[in-house]
Amino acid sequence: MIQTKDLKFSFNEKTTFSFPDLHNEASQTLLITGNSGKGKTTLLHLLGGLLRPDSGSISIQDTTISSLSEKELDQFRGKNIGLVLQQSHFVASLNVLENVVLASWLSNGEKATEKAKSLLVALDLEDQIYKLPSKLSIGQQQRVSIARALINEPKLLLADEPTSSLDDENAAKVADLLQKLSKEHKASLIIVTHDQRLKDTFSNHINLN
């Protein structure tokens, strides 16, 4: 599903990353851990096409995304990659449902309202659908981000520190939920985190040194 080879990226001469080769199939989960400053978020942004590598390749199914133009990459990302980032970046004036529907409209010009409702109900957010994101708890906002990431049935689901701000109970719930949804939607799931609690949930993991 997703495979990388000889991936390198540098912000400047002093901050250079060389990443291990990755391979993760559909419905599989890969946990990437490491201390702050080891490049976890940078790697996630490379995998999602938000950054371009200095060298090396990233292939999702049969597409080498590092060779796509900016326009092609935007279109590919919208249809194939779901992102759950540390900052949710909701449209503050839109309610929860509208924020999730917006993701489908931006991807293909269609408003998948019923599908968005079904996802929100499945994520136990049926009572929050018409609230503004600012009125939700951090855990609820995280679940809305997951719904938004899944609305276009992505082949690759990327999550950046999805549990770091949650207590033990809610961290376990979000971890289980991500794994369950990955299997249901046959999406390759990659989580980057410094949250050591997740090692007990995901057996397949690598550590960035």
Image: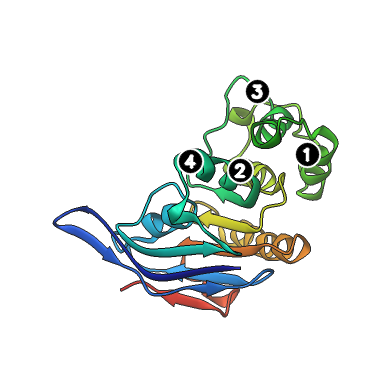
Task: Judge whether 79 appears above or below 192 on screen.
Answer: above
The amino acid on which the numbered mark 2 sits, given as a three-letter code, is: Gly
Which residue matches tag 2? 78
Query: Seen in the image, is 55 located left or right of residue 116?
Result: left
Q: Nearer the viewer, residue 35 or 173?
A: 35
Q: Secondary structure at mark 2?
A: helix
Point 57% across, 47% down: residue: 77
Q: Earlier in the sequence, mark 4 or mark 2?
A: 2
Which residue matches tag 4? 87
Circle 3/circle 1 CB separation < 8 Å? no
Query: Seen in the image, is 51 located left or right of residue 65?
Result: left
Task: Judge whether 208 appears above or below 156 on screen.
Answer: below
Q: Nearer the viewer, residue 94 or 102?
A: 102
Q: Which mark is residue 15?
A: none
Q: Earlier in the sequence, mark 1 or mark 2?
A: 2
- Quadrant location of residue 198? bottom right
Q: Earlier in the sequence, mark 4 or mark 1?
A: 4
The amino acid on which the numbered mark 4 sits, given as a three-letter code, is: Gln
How far, Cα to Cα, is label 4 from label 2? Answer: 18 Å
Q: Secondary structure at mark 1?
A: helix
Count of numbered badges drawn on the protein: 4
Which residue matches tag 1? 116
How far, Cα to Cα, is label 2 from label 3? Answer: 20 Å
Q: Position of residue 103 (x, y in %)?
A: 66, 35
Q: Label 3 crowding class (10 Å Cα cut-off): few <14, some 14-19, many 20+?
A: some
Mark toward the viewer: 2 or 3: 2
The amino acid on which the numbered mark 1 sits, given as a three-letter code, is: Ala
Residue reaching furthest top? 93
Residue reaching furthest left? 13
